[in-house]
Image (tube, rainbow, N blue to C red):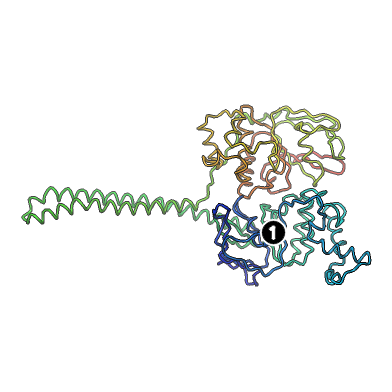
Amino acid sequence: MAHFCAQSPSFILHQVTCQFATGDVLFGPLTVSLEPTLCGLVGRNGSGKTRLLQLLSGLESPAHGHIESFARVIYVAQQHDVTADSCLADLLGLRAEFDALARVAHGEMEPDDVERLEGQWDLADRLRLAFRELSLPDFDPFLPAASLSGGERVKALLCAAFMSEADYLLLDEPTNHLDSAGREWFYHQLQGWNGGALIASHDRELLSQLPRILELTAGELRSYGGNFTAYQQQREAERQAAKNALEHAVVERKRTRARLQKEHDASLRRSAHTLRTVDSLNIASFERVAYKGAAKARPGSLRRQHREQNSALNLSVHEARERVEDEAQVMFTLPGNEIAAGKRVLECQQLVLRHTRTPPLTLRLQGPVRIAVRGPNGCGKTTLLKTLLGLETPVAGCCQLSVHSAWLDQHLSQFDLSQSVLSLLSLGDAPLEEGALRSRLVQLQLGADKVGLPLTALSGGERLKAVLASVLWRREPAQLLLLDEPTNHLDLASTEAIEAALADFPGAMLVVSHDEAFLRGLRLTHSLEWKESGWAFGEL
């Protein structure tokens, strides 16, 4: 059992197991206590982070075991579907409070309203101020919730969570849809939060501010003291220890196999010698028979012992290898992705975007430029990328692309996700034989067990790697990548793998992202940033 600190726990998990409907175990059994501290929750896509948060919130029940909860909890999910008739107060779980405030305002107070509104009389004013800080629409509790975008709904829920009387927050990727200003607001709110929180996130800047990291891996929940940097150091030490253990197991197996072979050869020689000389011994016939029987049986018995020892050695190596994470180099590019230094990539003349109020954009890009596209939510970053690709028609002006390009948004909406990895690659007429193609896919951790599955059956990271391969491994490969929040639904390992692969991409790219750690890893050359006066382009 892991105890994270000496405070009274907010939750105690007793042999908690989470299963799929098929009976396959997602994680567990977990026996652990969670204290009212700030903790980051990390793990690969599909490891069960969201399910763990839902179990702690009471929205789901474990397949086995039980959870003791000693805290008032608020859970903020990544996405919230709303009905046509639900209002903002419904979304925030504050409908009873705002109905009571409305009754008071109309002189129709009910007996329970005063008690219900204790400490909440200024709730609307506090939410109105917080909404203004986050550039949300003016706060109106009876505004249709469906009128807000998915990102605006998450922001609204975070506002309500920090203003609540909860003891513990359960937050699932809270910064995914926040722009830079929104993230700074969130970090500030978290620093002032007096309760506990468990935050599933791959936002490295956020994780660096948390005093403890929990990792859900291989069905276990591991605790690491310190922030994200300390977590990385401890994980690296574990990886190195696992590598050393694997090397030791391999060496020990080789040494033991050599010794066993010598024992086997010596046993055969002794048996052969006995069979050759036993008839010349001055002993009774029944003793000769016994000697011969023992000589013939001894090698077989030794072989059985050696097989058992060899199986144990193989198991030891196998277990050691399982503890070593796959660190195969991610290989993406093929000849044809490169762009010469002076080659024109795209040119825009007096471009005016739809649904935005920015001044006309004139821009000329040459060579392998790598551009961060920055700006607040709603300023038109996605519209800009779509317009550059010809997927949206501008209000005025024109844009001309001079190289093959590909657009990847966070939902991969340009691709048929019912296709398998191999069928997606065949559509692009990949210039590789099937054997070479499969070898490269293995380097992307897309082995034979995954390349035939539809993309919907893969994790977010696997899906993005497959799509990147499909646009780069074409007869006419993409030389310009337009990436729109590509890491929003990726785990840390996938984000770092994609980051490493794109860092060596020899073409041009425009990247929309609020993840500054991800952007720093891409070796960017320029920035295209939205300002009140228009788009500003410059070198980094």
Front residue of this view, candidates 57 and 443: 57
Identify which amino acid the numbered label 1 is placed on: Gln
Q: In the rendering, at what x and y percent does residue 499 appear?
A: 64, 44
| The one of 300 and 271 positioned closer to us in this rendering | 300
Callout 1: few (<14), some (14-19), or many (20+) C-alpha neighbours within 10 Å?
some
Return the residue nearer the eye: 519 or 285: 285
- Residue at (64%, 46%) from the top-left corner? 495
Q: Quadrant of the C terminus?
A: top right
Q: Position of residue 15 (x, y in %)?
A: 55, 65
Q: Is residue 35 left or right of residue 25?
A: right
If the image is split into quadrants, where does the N terminus sit?
bottom right
- Residue beneath disc 1: 209
- Closest to the observer, 192 or 342: 192
- Quarter residue 354 falls in: top right
Q: Is residue 250 above or below residue 66?
A: above
Q: Position of residue 401 (x, y in %)?
A: 74, 28
Q: How many marks?
A: 1
Q: Viewed as shown, does residue 238 lie left or right of 104?
A: left
**Above or below for 11 versus 393:** below
Q: For the point 55% across and 29% down, which residue is it?
A: 432
The vertical placement of 59 against 374, above or below, is below
Residue farthest along the right direction in this orientation: 107
Which of the 4 image quarters holds residue 91? bottom right
Where is residue 195, by image quadrant?
A: bottom right
Q: Secondary structure at mark 1?
A: loop
- Residue 497 rendering spot, x and y as whole percentages: 61, 45
